[in-house]
Image (cartoon, rainbow, N blue to C red):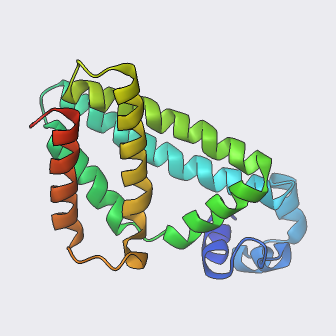
Amino acid sequence: MVFAARKLFAERGFHQTAMADLAKEAEVSVGAIYRVFPSKQDIIRAIIQADTARLLVELTSDVCRIRKGEASIGAVLEEMIVRCSVEKDSALIHEVLAEGHRNPEVAEAVRAINLQYRAIFREMALVANPDLSEPELYGAEELLLACLFSSGHRELTSCRLSARESARLVTSLILRGLGSET
């Protein structure tokens, strides 16, 4: 059901997708959907949770690789930006974010997830430069969160660089801003 919802929400939009459409796409009854998900907002939360769980595992693994000395902060940041650049769920992400502006429950789910991202980004920033002040750490969280979101929407921004080249240059600028060259 969630896979069908992802597909239809990305293609048609959240509000333009009826539960009957979801049922048909998922090859289940409308009643079966309502037994698992009382509302479309619950389906959106399930999509958010699934996507976030995957990304948080990747980011946590990235931080562990940095801490163990298996990868540099620069290499990890570049990989993160490239990963986000090549994922093809940007239409769905736009739908989720737009619904978050309309629906307080969805907004709260997005906020809670962003707090988790911020904690990981703060840790990355501290690895890059342990002497960052509290306001600088907040700024680093903002910057890395912006990279995470914006790199996933390259198709809308008239990019002049490849995803890899853009990631390399953005990473270099971030590291300089953090006071780290690694």
Q: In the image shown, does 145 or 109 lie closer to the viewer?
A: 145
Give the residue at x 60% y 47%. 49
Residue 88, quarter of picture = bottom left
Residue 100, given in percent of the width and then of the height, sits at 70, 55
Relative height, residue 98 to residue 119 (above, below): below
Q: Quadrant of the N terminus?
A: bottom right
Outermost left residue: 181
Which residue is painted at 20% across and 74% down in the image?
161
Left or right relative to 167: residue 72:
left
On screen, 121 above or below 53? Answer: above
Can you tell which quarter of the image residue 98 is in? bottom right
The answer to whether residue 62 is above or below residue 95 is: above
Q: Nearer the viewer, residue 27 or 49?
A: 49
**Residue drawn at (46%, 38%) of the image:** 117
Residue 105: x percent and y percent? 77, 46
Furthest residue toward right = 31
Q: Residue at x 87, y 54 (%)?
A: 38
